[in-house]
Image: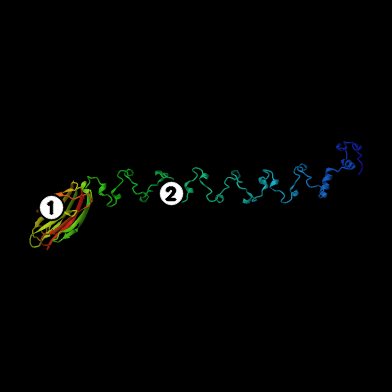
Amino acid sequence: MAPDRSKAGGNRNRSDVLLDPRANRRVHLLHHGISSTQNVVDQIGKTPGLIPDGTIVTAKLADEAVTADKIANNTITEAQLADTAITGGKIANTTITATQLASDAVTTAKINAGAVTTTELGADAVDGTKIADDAIGSEHIADDAVGSAQIADGAVDAARLAAGAVSTAKLQEGAVVAGVLASSAVTTASIADDAVTEAKLADTVVVRADRQVGDPYASLQTTSLTQYYSFTIPGGTLATRTVRVHAHGTMKQNSGSSQNFRHVVRLGGVDIHEASGSIANDADQIVWIMRMDLSFRAAGAQFLSGEWRVSSASTSADGISNIFGMHRDGTWGNNAVAQTDSGDLALTFHQRWDTSRTNSEYKVYAINVEYV
């Protein structure tokens, strides 16, 4: 190499010759046996293994000196990554799967608004704490989704019930009490047949306890005392009620001669009244009416009174509007009835003819029993 003949390099032994910009550095480096930086770099690149392992430390690397080509595959592990070193731009699309995520790695701040859809939610993932107040409207509730267990005690008030929602089947037995009923709410149509018992009526109300009618209801032709009607008086009734009986019908006595007609009333199997009277022989029917009151006098002591009315004979041509004379008319009573009335008592009615039943008949068309 030619010597440095520049004015600055005339004296190659000058200590500051390499600092002089006018000097030819290469000439002076070679003269002193010193290689340039570039020459060193070139020599390292040409000679693998020239640099001992561990010689190049971080301080020796210039900024951006390590490019992608300098990094071998699978070289960078977790230990090589600094905190927050991996930004969004460093991650390829669809690269991160479930296996890449650590437990509790995805916090609220990491989830985009609207990113969690139905398919992202696990079974039973949404509990009460996840639902905001007033968030659930009618459109979010499936048909039949709300069962009894879902309704809090006292939650269903009047405002929640639609008109006509409470049917008979929804009412608990005994739930409708007097205070619930509006004035005049219970009409005749609302009361079932036989629903109003005697116990439901005030003592001042006359109650029909029984009614029997027919064409006729009973017809007898006998000389033996025969029962034609029976009614049971419930125990304790006579202490608060009078039992009133009203019956009517027809009779005919055409046996060939006069004979006695007999009628018996029994209470608890004991005779308490007997009516008897002679009925003339006649081919026509006559009308009879019986009224009777049985009332409380004292415990185990009742009073009985009544009347019998029997018309005179009528012709077959007579109409029902005709007024007939009286053949028998009488009032009767018995103040010695001593039946214990704490239990049920049978009130029975019996009839017979004394001597002959030939062409003799006794018919009952109606009998009514009332509590007065």
Q: Are marks 1 and 2 in contact (CB under 8 Å)?
A: no
Task: Count neighbours of disc 2 (C-alpha within 10 A) and say few if under 14, some if 14 to 19, many if 20 or more.
Answer: few
Q: Which mark is residue 240?
A: none
Task: Classify 252 as above or below 183.
Answer: below
Q: Which mark is residue 308?
A: 1
Identify which residue, 302 or 258, lies in the foreground: 302
Identify which residue, 221 or 1, lies in the foreground: 221
Q: Quadrant of the rendered structure where residue 153 is? A: top left
Q: Is residue 304 left or right of residue 125?
A: left
Q: Dot 1 lies on which element? A: strand
Q: Residue 208: give x, y in percent of width and height.
A: 22, 50
Task: Count neighbours of disc 1 (C-alpha within 10 A) and say few if under 14, some if 14 to 19, many if 20 or more.
Answer: some
* Colour scheme employed for the rendering of this structure: rainbow
Identify the mark nearer the N-term, 1 or 2. 2
Task: Classify 138 as above or below 13.
Answer: below
Amino acid type, callout 2: Ser
Q: Residue 112: give x, y in percent of width and height.
A: 59, 45
The alpha-carbon separation of the residues under discs 1 and 2 comes to: 67 Å
Q: Dot 2 lies on which element? A: helix
Residue placed furthest toward the left: 257
Amino acid type, callout 1: Trp
Identify residue for label 2. Answer: 148
Q: Residue 242: give x, y in percent of width and height.
A: 19, 48
**Residue 276 seen in the figure:** yes
Q: Quadrant of the rendered structure where residue 10 is? A: top right
Q: Quadrant of the rendered structure where residue 113 is? A: top right
